[in-house]
């Protein structure tokens, strides 16, 4: 299957990065290379781009896409490890801009073999972004205790029918292993009252999202990663972050808000003793995709874009 992905809010990302031709930039989630290409198009021959992705298929695609461009360094790694790489390579404090696109690529969603989508009826339940890891969605639904499955669907999917879905998953796996996306989608469908299936999209959407988040540890240490990445920026450098669901956006928002504070002492305290210093300035309130983009790319509908500048 050909790797294809339409970068969400492309022009807004490029504008907010405020790219300097000779700068050093980091694309934390290279994916199909759409945003990376945009950065490269704005760099001179002395500019540099480091692009991270833990999906080997994405990296292979980008290696081919950028094979003749000496300005690009491609790294197979979770972006949460990027701050350590930058530190180890004496790049901390020298980065002009960082882009984090927290969405799942179109290729991952549309490739039935990856098992991300409830639309692929007979696909194996996988959902790994990094195929070298052992944990899969199949492992969770067939072996995790009912209470743990409930917590995953409730906390990550914010589904009010999480208890019923978890119960029915356990009942069905006692009859036969749950191997495919279609089996799981049917279980979820039967767990939700008929009258409520007419609104809110496919009934399995929240469960599939919750399992994907759990499999890939998408929210684990997200706040720390953002903080560490910001501390790799030079003064005036920018971080631009695309989110696609409320849980990750809340973490991003809270992290950025904290980093812009210059004191966290009790307001009643006579003097500041916390030692907290302001590290960033927020660049406007979050923005969303234009109506035109939402009409042509449905995956942009839930996107929120936030940006901040290192001070």
Image: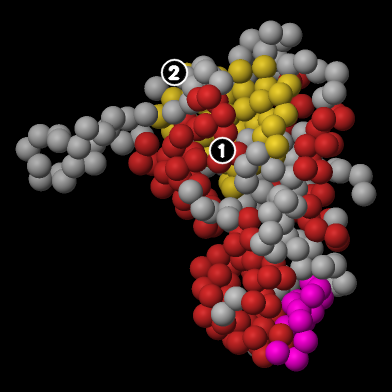
**Which numbered disc covers residue 235?**
2
Q: Secondary structure at mark 2?
A: strand
Q: Which residues are magenta?
A: 174-187
Q: Position of residue 271 (x, y in %)?
A: 10, 34
Asked if residue 175 is among those painted magenta in the image, a careful observer would answer: yes
Q: Which of disc 2 and disc 1 is earlier in sequence?
A: 1
Q: Which of the 4 image quarters holds residue 276?
A: top left
* Residue tagged 1: 81
- Residue 191 visible? The answer is no
Q: Secondary structure at mark 1?
A: helix
Q: Is residue 66 above or below residue 79?
A: above
| Secondary structure character of the magenta stretch overall | helix
Q: Which of the 4 image quarters holds residue 70?
A: top right
Distance between mark 1 and mark 2 Cα atoms: 22 Å
Q: Of residues 155 and 270, which is closer to you in this image? A: 155
Q: Position of residue 300 (x, y in %)?
A: 70, 49
- Residue 163 visible? The answer is yes
Horizontally, residue 293 falls left or right of residue 140, namely right
């Amino acid at each position: 299957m050909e790797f294809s992905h339409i970068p969400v809010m492309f022009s807004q990302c490029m504008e907010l990065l405020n790219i300097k031709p000779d700068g050093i930039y980091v694309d934390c989630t290279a994916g199909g290379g759409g945003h990376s290409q945009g950065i490269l198009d704005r760099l001179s021959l002395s500019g540099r781009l480091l692009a991270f992705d833990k999906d080997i298929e994405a990296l292979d695609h980008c290696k081919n896409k950028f094979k003749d461009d000496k300005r690009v360094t491609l790294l197979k790694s979770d972006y949460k490890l990027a701050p350590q790489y930058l530190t180890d390579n004496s790049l901390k404090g020298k980065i002009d801009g960082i882009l984090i696109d927290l969405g799942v690529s179109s290729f991952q969603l549309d490739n039935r073999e990856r098992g991300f989508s409830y639309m692929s009826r007979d696909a194996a339940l996988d959902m790994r972004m990094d195929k070298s890891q052992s944990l899969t969605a199949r492992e969770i639904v067939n072996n995790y205790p009912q209470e743990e499955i409930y917590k995953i669907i409730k906390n990550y999917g914010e589904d009010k029918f999480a208890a019923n879905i978890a119960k029915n998953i356990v009942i069905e796996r006692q009859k036969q292993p749950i191997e495919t996306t279609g089996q799981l989608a049917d279980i979820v469908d039967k767990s939700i009252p008929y009258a409520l299936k007419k609104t809110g999209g496919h009934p399995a959407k929240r469960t599939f999202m919750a399992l994907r988040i759990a499999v890939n540890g998408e929210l684990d240490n997200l706040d720390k990663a953002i903080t560490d990445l910001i501390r790799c920026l030079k003064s005036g450098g920018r971080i631009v972050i695309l989110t696609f669901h409320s849980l990750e956006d809340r973490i991003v928002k809270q992290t950025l808000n904290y980093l812009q504070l210059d004191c966290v002492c009790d307001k009643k305290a006579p003097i500041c003793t916390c030692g907290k210093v302001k590290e960033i300035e927020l660049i406007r309130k979050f923005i969303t995709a234009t109506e035109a983009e939402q009409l042509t790319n449905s995956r942009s509908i839930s996107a929120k874009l936030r940006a901040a500048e290192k001070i």
